[in-house]
Image (cartoon, grey):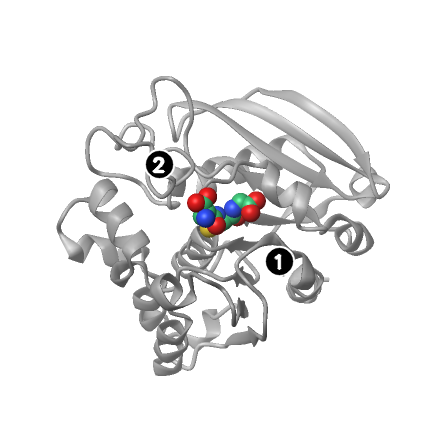
Amino acid sequence: MSITQVSATKAFGGWHKQFSHQSDATSCEMRFAIFLPPQAQHQSVPVLYWLSGLTCTDENFMQKAAAFKVAAQLGIAIVAPDTSPRGDNVPDDDNHAYDFGLGAGFYLNATQPPFNQHYRMYDYVVNELPSVIEANFGVNQQRAISGHSMGGHGALSIAFKNLDKYSSVSAFSPICQPTTCPWGQKAFSGYLGQDKQSWLQYDSSALITQLTDSNKHIPALVDQGSDDNFLAEQLNPQALVAAAKTVNYPLELRIQPGYDHSYFFISSFIEDHLHFHAANFKA
Ligand SMILES: N[C@@H](CCC(=O)N[C@@H](CS)C(=O)NCC(=O)O)C(=O)O
């Protein structure tokens, strides 16, 4: 699995780099970004996987989240994949809507044509990308996962389906119950079809209720701005909290007064999330 460097920029004693590679999971070329802290030059470091939201690429988090200073202090690499497959052969929403198709892969494996060939972001994020990262960079197999909005849904649902692969999970303004909100219903019906039973395998509020073995729980932190314009219609953190309570899952929801849905919010609390993940990596 060869990867091609697209850019390399020094930051906080470490490096921000972008790479492209041919993906088996999505059957197209994928680009990802990685921040390598200074420690990665002489020891293997843990990795935080960051999943971005609707309309994003690998660039939004890296340019706007202000995460590098603390990641460099803590010795954490950060990997940000794209939010969907891309390229001329990859089908998009008929109307090029921002919430379906390109830039809106929802971190699932599509089953419905014409999306099922390329829209396999679940396999890409869970399996292929960590293999690529662990084969090519000075990282170890300690992983955490986080994300924003659609990417918060991705981080939570992926973690809840793979508790053995991650030591902690966090999210900013996640879509907590995609089966009941407009963004999720549009995406899931397009990618997965009309059988709503099949949607539940990617719904964090449904998935968490199956996690009855408390020995396997990994810590989960969710930050949500109170003035997020998508909160009422799309995000429903209370559903996730209520579901978590049914199995005593250790999930902390913090409502942050006055904050909105933007990267201004993410950059205000990303340090907390990095410290949270660092504390849960094994020494
Ligand atoms: N109002 C936005 C909705 C999309 C949006 O808010 N995207 C969030 C994630 S759900 C984002 O991170 N946008 C990119 C950025 O702020 O850099 C649009 O129509 O483009």
Residue 276 position within the rendered picture, expressed as x and y whole percent measured from the top left: 66, 66
Vertical comparison of 175 with 39: above or below: below
Query: Which secondary structure lies at badge 1?
Result: helix
Residue 120 is labelled as 2
Which picture quadrant has residue 161?
A: bottom left
Residue 236 appears at what percent x and percent y? Answer: 37, 69
Residue type marked 1: Ile
Q: Quick check: 202 left or right of 149? A: left
Q: Is the Cβ of the residue at disc 2 closer than 8 Å to that at disc 1?
A: no
Mark found first going from the N terminus, 2 or 1: 2
The quarter of the image holding the C terminus is bottom right
Q: Amino acid at mark 2?
A: Arg
Crowd tier of the residue under label 1, counting other residues whose Cα lies within 10 Å: few below 14, some 14–19, many 20 or above? many
Note whether residue 264 is visible. Answer: yes
Q: Where does label 1 land, which residue? A: 266
Q: Nearer the viewer, mark 2 or mark 1?
A: 1
Where disc 2 sits, the SS reads loop
Q: Residue furthest left?
A: 195
Asked if the residue at label 2 sits under 8 Å from ligand 1, the reply is: no
Q: CA distance from mark 2 to mark 1?
A: 26 Å
Residue at (36%, 69%) from the top-left corner? 208
Q: Residue at x 25, y 53 (%)?
A: 185
